[in-house]
Image (spheres, grey):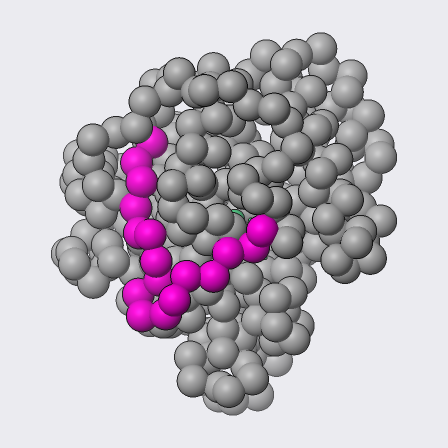
Amino acid sequence: MAVPMILDCDPGHDDAKAILLAAADPAIDLLAITTVAGNSTLEKVTLNARRICAVAGLRDIPIASGADRPLQREPRIADDVHGESGMDGPAFGEPDVPLAGEGVVALMRRLVDESPEPVTLVPTGPLTNIARLLIEHPEVRTGIREIVWMGGSTGRGNTTPYAEFNALVDPEAADQVVRSGVPFTMCGLNVTHQAAVTEDVVNRLRGIDSVLAEVCVELMTFFAGRYKSLFGFDAPPLHDPVAVARVVDPTLVRCVDANLVVETTGEWTSGATCVDLHGITGRPANAKVAVELDVERFWDRFIEAVRALG
Ligand code: BDR
Ligand code: CA
């Protein structure tokens, strides 16, 4: 049976690809797409979610807009990586995909309540919406199978030396979610950097004769340019679909059990995800931490999703 899932995202080039994989792969029953301020303002990332859904012909999945700022901190965007629109590259028309009238927290709560099976939450942005859900409706925890997050890192960061962007934007939210008691999986930079969009991947997308595939190529071309100039990468990492892939087929993303805490007070290290990979603190494991991607099967599955959407 397909896994009921909600994707909470901030599109974002790689979030857009996460939407495609989640919507098209038969292993997932995508109940909703929810947005959170992150890569760009809430208004822009929500428009971008509607844009990619319109291009992909996804009209039956509710899209709802959530938190416009972190729990406590000032918003921080990543226009250096994603451009002024939050998803620069292709020329998008006005999307003919509506926005749900319900707020994100109410929608998530209702969907979890109504689902006969526990629901998996996949956040691919700051954890603000998820933290608000768990704070406002703690009873919802029993209806959540697990939270599989793209964020953090077992090593260094990408926005400060020790913090990954999604963790840095709202460390208090990440801390709350990690400590909520809901099973938690972290797919951090150490694993998402294995999902490199090589020339071969781009050529496979080019081989699909569809407007959606062309938009994917244009998104990747912009993203590759930014990753080259900002970080010196020859092939940019497609972070967010890795978290979706873990739900699609857990064998695609190997995880280990470890203790995870989120730094919220460090002067230089706020947003750092401290993962005790070798058990040196004696603190019990409280998370699954992704360490290895089956790169070939991951791309096969992603390309198939784009092909299936036509
Ligand atoms: C994460 O930050 C965002 O820019 C990407 O969409 C991804 O979720 C990578 O650090
Ligand atoms: Ca993201």
Q: Residue at the location (71% across, 10% down)?
A: 209
The x, y position of residue 194, in whole percent, is 73, 52
**Quadrant holding the C terminus:** top right
**Quadrant holding the N terminus:** top left
Residue 83 picture quarter = top right
Q: Is residue 233 left or right of residue 179?
A: right
Based on the picture, tell me whether residue 72 belongs to the magenta stretch: yes
Q: Nearer the viewer, residue 292 or 265?
A: 265
The x, y position of residue 166, in whole percent, is 50, 60
Q: Is residue 30 left or right of residue 181?
A: right
Tell me how many marks there are. Answer: 0
* Image: 213 above or below 136: above
Q: Residue at the location (22% across, 47% down)?
A: 105
* Image: 106 above or below 114: below
Q: Is residue 175 left or right of residue 250?
A: left
Q: Residue furthest front?
A: 84
Q: Examine the rendering and report whether any part of residue 242 can be seen.
A: no
Q: Residue at the location (54% across, 31% down)?
A: 21
Residue 190 picture quarter = bottom right
* Image: 211 above or below 268: above
The x, y position of residue 309, in whole percent, is 55, 16
Q: Examine the rendering and report whether any part of residue 163 can be seen.
A: yes
Q: Residue at the location (61% across, 19% down)?
A: 212
The magenta segment: 63-79
Based on the picture, tell me whether residue 40 belongs to the magenta stretch: no
Residue 158 picture quarter = bottom right
The x, y position of residue 104, in whole percent, is 26, 43
